Image (spheres, rainbow, N blue to C red):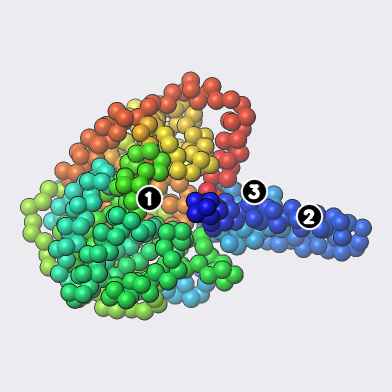
């Protein structure tokens, strides 16, 4: 019974569930309109108002500076579901901000600039040491979103959440001043309960502990009163964009970031959420293949400022960041590290641009792992152009999906990429959740940004860009090891897909920006 209720709850609160509800409502209204208004003068008035609202919605969508593929998807929805397509867009589409949120966003950006702006002048030095390509990639993040590039930072790569578990607990045990945690999903179980036990003990010892989680991401895993429970333990808690039925109209933008920061000196990020499937304690979709990265040194300060800016955003207050700044780390570490973050409200697709920069600078290979392959025109052209130019482009996606609809859309992109020479593999043991790029043995990124519209245009995200660190070779080796456990998808196999399924995938691809 519990499993049934859980599935029903997930459907009701999922975007697809909302869309299905709106479609059902549309059908009901159409029936009523035909029965009650068909032979009256009011039917024309009703239909005229509905069409006018839809036209206004389309003009609004076209006028917004958003991705064209995203716009087309919503235009189809609005015009096909008159008048409820407009309501769907109000609830789930676009990034229109209230005046209140615009002010909070400006404050958030100002705080980031105040704390990190002076450090955003290192890309020129990086260009001298690592080449112009590295310098230009770093300069983009420094100038656009105040994300400096750092030396003096050790990195450790984790090819599985399982092997990250013990290091997380050890790092938390070593906290002396503060612990900051921000995750999309938190679920009670072995992983989170082990973390929480340490957090409560550290809070009792006087360590400052703060937790942020996304309300929709954790709506089926945590009770509504969970912040109060944490506060009783001495753990400060904030919930991002809390869902309030009938009052919450803007649920499109979610906090998909993953941060665990200890004393401003050690930090973890990557694809791993605080739930047991991420460490393969609770099997869901076969073997869960995820990745994470540990930073120790100067670059952690950038992530700390990012967390504190989000904390201030969630409570509409400001505090001094300086007391949380750690002392400089010792030098002598090879390579450079650049943590970055992405805000959906500034019309700057940072995650997408990082990926495009990596693809466009590849001369030998680009290896990618992603749970979803729902890509826009710019990414499609970049990947196919690189492959046609002789770059070895390989992508690993899951063989066992977590969302069957999105899985069909992912496979809808295969044939076009394969025709250009891109090689695609599916991870046969289960579900791959890591979001990694590795390029030419020189650059890599590990983070939270999926290759889909929601991550690239609608969610708060974060990642770490690596320049010639030892972990780049480890990420490359992990890709090849994962490829050995995967099945390669051939162009012939794609062409043998039955016509009805191909048509279904094409139809779903039209809706890709909404998934």
Q: Is residue 45 above or below residue 492?
A: below
Nearest to N terminus: mark 1 or mark 2: 2
Q: Which residue is mark 1?
A: 449
* Residue located 24% across and 56% down the image: 268
Q: Which mark is residue 286?
A: none
Can you tell which of label 1 and label 2 is closer to the viewer?
A: 2
Of residues 472 and 123, the one drawn nearer to the viewer in this rendering: 472
Residue 121, horizontal then vertical, whole percent: 22, 61
Of residues 275 and 23, the one drawn nearer to the viewer in this rendering: 275
Q: Residues within 10 Å of mark 2 (few under 14, many from 20)?
A: some
The answer for how far apart the CA atoms under marks 1 and 2 are is: 40 Å
* Residue located 81% across and 58% down the image: 32
The answer for how far apart the CA atoms under marks 1 and 3 are is: 26 Å
Q: Taking 387 as reference, is 126 left or right?
A: left
Q: Which residue is mark 3?
A: 76
Q: Secondary structure at mark 2?
A: helix
Of residues 119 and 86, the one drawn nearer to the viewer in this rendering: 86
The answer for how far apart the CA atoms under marks 2 and 3 are is: 19 Å
Q: Residues within 10 Å of mark 1 (few under 14, many from 20)?
A: many
Q: Which residue is mark 2?
A: 30
Can you tell which of label 2 and label 3 is closer to the viewer?
A: 2
């Amino acid at each position: 019974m519990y499993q049934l209720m859980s599935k029903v709850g997930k459907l009701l609160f999922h975007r697809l569930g909302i869309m299905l509800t709106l479609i059902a409502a549309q059908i009901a209204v159409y029936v009523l309109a035909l029965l009650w208004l068909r032979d009256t003068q009011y039917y024309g008035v009703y239909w005229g108002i509905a069409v006018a609202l839809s036209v206004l919605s389309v003009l609004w969508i076209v006028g917004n500076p958003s991705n064209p593929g995203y716009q087309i998807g919503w235009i189809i929805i609005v015009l096909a579901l008159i008048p409820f397509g407009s309501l769907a867009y109000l609830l789930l589409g676009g990034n229109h901000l209230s005046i209140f949120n615009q002010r909070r966003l400006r404050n958030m950006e100002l705080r980031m600039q105040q704390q990190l702006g002076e450090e955003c002048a290192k890309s020129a030095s990086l260009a001298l040491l690592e080449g112009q390509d590295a310098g230009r990639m770093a300069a983009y993040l420094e100038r656009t979103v105040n994300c400096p590039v750092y030396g003096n930072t050790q990195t450790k790569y984790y090819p599985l959440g399982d092997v990250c578990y013990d290091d997380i607990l050890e790092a938390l045990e070593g906290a002396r001043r503060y612990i900051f945690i921000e995750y999309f999903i938190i679920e009670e179980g072995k992983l989170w309960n082990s973390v929480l036990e340490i957090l409560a003990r550290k809070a009792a010892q006087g360590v400052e502990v703060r937790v942020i989680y996304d309300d929709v991401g954790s709506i089926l895993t945590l009770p509504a009163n969970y912040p109060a429970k944490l506060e009783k333990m001495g753990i400060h808690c904030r919930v991002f964009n809390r869902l309030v039925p009938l009052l919450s109209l803007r649920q499109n933008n979610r906090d998909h970031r993953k941060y665990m920061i200890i004393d401003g000196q050690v930090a973890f990020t990557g694809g791993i959420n605080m739930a047991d499937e991420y460490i393969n304690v609770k099997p869901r979709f076969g073997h869960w293949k995820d990745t994470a990265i540990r930073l120790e040194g100067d670059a952690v300060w950038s992530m700390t400022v990012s967390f504190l800016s989000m904390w201030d955003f969630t409570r509409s207050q400001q505090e001094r960041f300086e007391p949380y700044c750690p002392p400089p780390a010792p030098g002598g570490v090879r390579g450079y590290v650049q943590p970055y973050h992405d805000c959906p409200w500034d019309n700057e697709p940072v995650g997408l641009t990082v990926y495009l920069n990596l693809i466009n600078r590849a001369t030998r290979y680009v290896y990618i792992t992603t749970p979803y392959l729902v890509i826009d025109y710019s990414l499609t052209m970049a990947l196919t152009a690189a492959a046609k130019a002789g770059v070895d482009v390989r992508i690993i996606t899951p063989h066992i999906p977590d969302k069957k609809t999105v899985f069909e859309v992912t496979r809808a992109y295969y044939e076009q990429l394969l025709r250009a020479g891109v090689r695609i593999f599916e991870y046969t043991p289960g579900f791959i959740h890591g979001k990694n790029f590795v390029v030419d043995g020189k650059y890599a990124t590990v983070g939270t940004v999926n290759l889909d519209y929601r991550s690239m245009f609608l969610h708060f995200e974060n990642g770490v860009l690596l320049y010639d660190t030892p972990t780049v070779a480890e990420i490359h080796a992990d890709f090849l090891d994962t490829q050995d456990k995967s099945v390669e998808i051939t162009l012939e196999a794609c062409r043998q897909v039955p016509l009805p399924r191909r048509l279904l995938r094409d139809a779903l691809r039209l809706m890709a920006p909404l998934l």
